[in-house]
Image: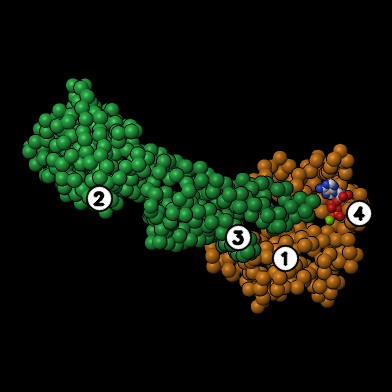
Chain colours: A green, B orange
Amino acid sequence: MFLVKLSLKNLMRHKKRTIITALIIAWAIFFYITFDSLLIGMNDMVFQNIIDYEYGHIQISNQTYWENKDELSLDNLITNDETINNKITEIDRYQNHAAQLNFQARLNDGVNETPVLGRGIRPEQTFDVLKYKDYIIKGEVFKMGEHKAIIGKRLSDIMNLDVGDYITLLTKTKNDTLNTIDAEISGVINTPNPNINQNLVFVPLDISQNALNLNNKVSHYIVRLDSQIFNQSIVNSFQKELGEINSNFGVYSWRNLDEVSITKAKQSGNVLILIIILTIAAIGIINIVILAALERMEEIGMMKALGLKEKEIVYTFVIESTGIGIIGGMFGIILGAISVYLFTKIGIDFGAFMDMDMTQYGIPIISKIYGGWNPKTFIYMFFFAVFGSMLASILPARWAAKKDPVKAIYRR
Amino acid sequence: MALLKLKAIKKIYSQEKIEVAALRGIDLEINEGEFSTVFGPSGSGKTTLLNLIGCLDKPTSGKIYFEGNYIANFSKKDLAKIRRKNIGFVFQSYNLIPVLTAYENVEFAINIVDDISKDEIKDRVLRMLSLVGLKGLEDRKPNELSGGQKQRVAIARALVKKPKLVLADEPSANLDSKTSEDILEIMMKMNKELNTTFLFSTHDPLVMKHAERKIEIKDGMITKDERGEKVNVFS
Ligand SMILES: Nc1ncnc2c1ncn2[C@@H]1O[C@H](COP(=O)(O)OP(=O)(O)O)[C@@H](O)[C@H]1O
Ligand SMILES: [Mg+2]
């Protein structure tokens, strides 16, 4: 107890030095928390983007189809019948759903040709599940049965296409015969999700089914739930129920997407920052212990003369450093909380970084990034600061405690 | 019984190939309750001798017995244990801990000795501070005390755990002669009242004249060892 008291008094000995070291630690924590928060915010936004503009909360498709969904094959499709549609509406927290048909196509405007992703939709369904409505920047939505298409903004720029222009989609039917869909562009869409804007062509579901020789087949359903929170149990229980209809059907949450796991992997960049930060903090602590030890050499010698064990001398330094860690940790999480609060409220305008091509990261272009709260980070960082300071101090403290008492007392 | 016995003690410092023989064969016995001084010119080996006796350092050769125990091959930890319980130190430069008050500096020495209750600690610290004449100054920090007062705190610190032996290395070297006498008086008073064994070094003839036993050391050898009557400084 007495040694703890001594350590705390030593802590206040050079208030400036203590505060500066604590502030270094605090700054490191603050930086990490802020960075982490923005990363979470960024991830959340990417996830929200995926949910709102591309995927919904849940997708349902044939399991074999899902495994090779990028091939856009016309095998293993689902018959869009009443049984499955009714079943889908029974999902817990169900809001709405849409049947969609993906197909490979080449867009031809009479001069140029480019590969695109064709998507047959029921506009009233898809526009319910996905938030496209506000992003039709030109023209309007088509109706079922109309030979019309909606294309992404970038695609329209690249191909120099506008509302009212005619396009031809060259496709292959299931039997490998060539077919075409002629359509008039009814609208141009520019969503915050760059994937949609780049190479998607929406056409009425029935038109695409006819052209591809697919009788009432769809590739997948997208479902919106009324909860943002990811809930694997909903997916699991629905998978079970759906299995009773057809054991080939699979239920997939947005969490299962490759893009999502890639984004999570990006977080490992955090670890690097964490290591850098811990190193900075550790250097601060080591520095302060060495300075203190040099300055208190006679005292250390005296303490040894009094009969204090080396362990006890180490202990006084470790307590002192831990105290600095606690102060730094507290400052750090307070600063971090303020910063995260500001970022969640105000956000950071990535318009300023427009020159950077953020789309390649799946980050929406026309948007602000908001911070996200992660209480775990606060707790972890506080303990990192405290234990990091503690550990960092042990070595220099042992060096100090090992000093020959005679040399220490007489500074020889 | 001799509290302390030194036999053929040699201490050689070697620094960068230069060897300095600080002690060149010391034989010495100190009895319990003795008030002795080691005197001699600067560089004669006084500090080295006291450090060896105080278990702060080990001799190059020779034997040291503390209460009959041969301590030359004790581990650092065991030596610390002996110091903790049995030896009090007073240094020329006081070596008080600046962040602690006079009270706490004294408390420190007794706090690390086991088996003493809180109440007894408080009691003994206060009594000791009043014995050395610092009543009312308990809450002062070292920088609020004069040199003489600091050395009184150091003496109280050395004595509070009731050690068998107090070693004082030129305790009055930094003090004026009046204060030196005061400090010496206090040490003698403690020696009388508590029967603590004192061994202090000095190169000041004025200080050394009070000692009951005078051990002269020159060039690392004892050249004189006189026992006289206890001088009554209070008369
Ligand atoms: N750590 C050391 N390294 C080298 N020489 C030392 C060391 N300590 C003391 N000496 C030498 O040993 C001799 C005795 O020193 P010391 O015991 O301090 O004498 P005193 O206390 O009587 O002045 C001196 O010549 C001194 O220079
Ligand atoms: Mg000396």
Which of these two is toward me, B31 or A266? A266
| B57 lies left or right of A90 | right
Coordinates of residue B174 in the picture (x, y in percent): 82, 66
Q: Which mark is residue B224?
A: 4
Q: In what element is the residue under mark 3?
A: helix
Residue A297 visible to the viewer = yes
Residue at screen point 49% across, 58% down: A332
Which of these two is toward me, A150 or A235? A150
Disc 3 target residue: A20
Residue at screen point 38% across, 52% down: A366
Could you tell me how far apart the alpha carbons at marks 4 and 2 are, in whole angstroms?
Answer: 117 Å
Labels 4, 3: front one: 3
Residue B79 visible to the viewer = no
Residue A36 vertical position relative to residue A247 in the rendered view, above or below: below
- Which amino acid type is marked by label 2? Gly
- Which amino acid type is marked by label 3? Ile
Same subunit: marks 2 and 3? yes
Q: In what element is the residue under mark 4?
A: strand
Same subunit: marks 4 and 3? no
Disc 2 target residue: A139
Same subunit: marks 4 and 2? no
Disc 1 target residue: B155
Q: In what element is the residue under mark 1?
A: helix
Coordinates of residue A217 in the picture (x, y in percent): 14, 32
Mark 4, Cα crowd under 10 Å, few <14 / some 14-19 / many 20+, is few
Indicate which disc, 2 or 3, sits on the residue closer to the N terminus. Answer: 3
- Which amino acid type is marked by label 1? Ile
Could you tell me how far apart the alpha carbons at marks 2 and 3 are, in whole angstroms?
Answer: 61 Å
Residue at screen point 59% across, 62% down: A19
| A341 lies left or right of A103 | right
Coordinates of residue A14 in the picture (x, y in percent): 64, 63
